[in-house]
Each structure stands twice: as structure tokens, then as C-alpha cells.
Amino acid sequence: MTSKLKDKMARLGVSQAELARRTGIDTYRVSRYVNRCANPNPQTLAKFAAALGCEPAELQEQPAADVPHSGKAVARD
């Protein structure tokens, strides 16, 4: 599954290194956000959006519901 951030970068032809340069965020952190190993805080999301010429909401992932084997939803902490 790809992230909205990765999809937007691909459409614009922006590499992780270029996004890091545009935002001032180190490439390691950019990679973690692009590959969904970490979630950016609102300020970081705003930096990505500004660098990619879009609104932060366009990059925001919808949280997946936690559904255990019983099929009942579990509340997130």
C-alpha cells in the first residue's frame, strides 16, 4: 500500500531527497514518512504540503480501523 504522500511525490516527479531539501527535514525522516513507518505531526504535514503545492488534507492518511479476529472494532488509545 502506498501513502498519499508517496503518490503525490510520484505524480510531481519529486524524490525523497528533493522533498527533504524543500522542507529542511532530513532524508531519513522523509523516508520514514513516505514509507508509512512514522506519521508526520501537523507541522511536518504542512511543510510537505507547502513543498508539494497542495493542502495538508490531500496528504493526510485515513486511520485504519483496528479489527481483531472477532470482527469487532477496537478503540485506539
Image: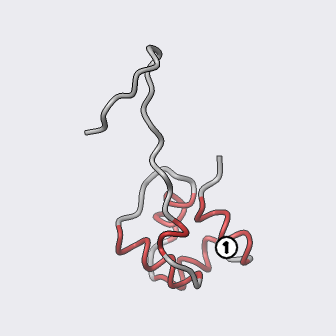
The local crowd at label 1, few if under 14, some if 14 to 19, many if 20 or more residues have their Cα within 10 Å, is: few
> From the viewer's perspective, is residue 67 above or below residue 27?
above
Left or right of 9 in this view: 77: left
Q: What element carries label 1?
A: loop
Q: Within the image, what quadrant is residue 21 found in?
A: bottom right
User: Residue 43, how many percent across, how many down?
Assistant: 35, 75
Residue at the far front: name it: 72
Left or right of 33 in this view: 41: left
User: Residue 31, how many percent across, how many down?
Assistant: 54, 61
Which quadrant is home to the C terminus? top left
42 vs 15, nearest the viewer:
42
> From the viewer's perspective, is residue 18 above or below residue 7?
below
> From the viewer's perspective, is residue 24 above or below residue 3?
below
User: Residue 27, how many percent across, how many down?
Assistant: 52, 69
52 vs 74, nearest the viewer:
74
Q: Which amino acid does label 1 sit on?
A: Ser
Residue placed under numbered mark 1 in the picture: 15
User: Residue 51, how many percent across, how many down?
Assistant: 54, 84
Kindly identify the residue that appears in the image at 51 percent across and 78 percent down.
55
Kindly identify the residue that appears in the image at 48 percent across and 50 percent down.
37
Which colour scheme appears in the figure? secondary structure
Residue at the far top: name it: 70
Kindly identify the residue that appears in the image at 53 percent across and 67 percent down.
59
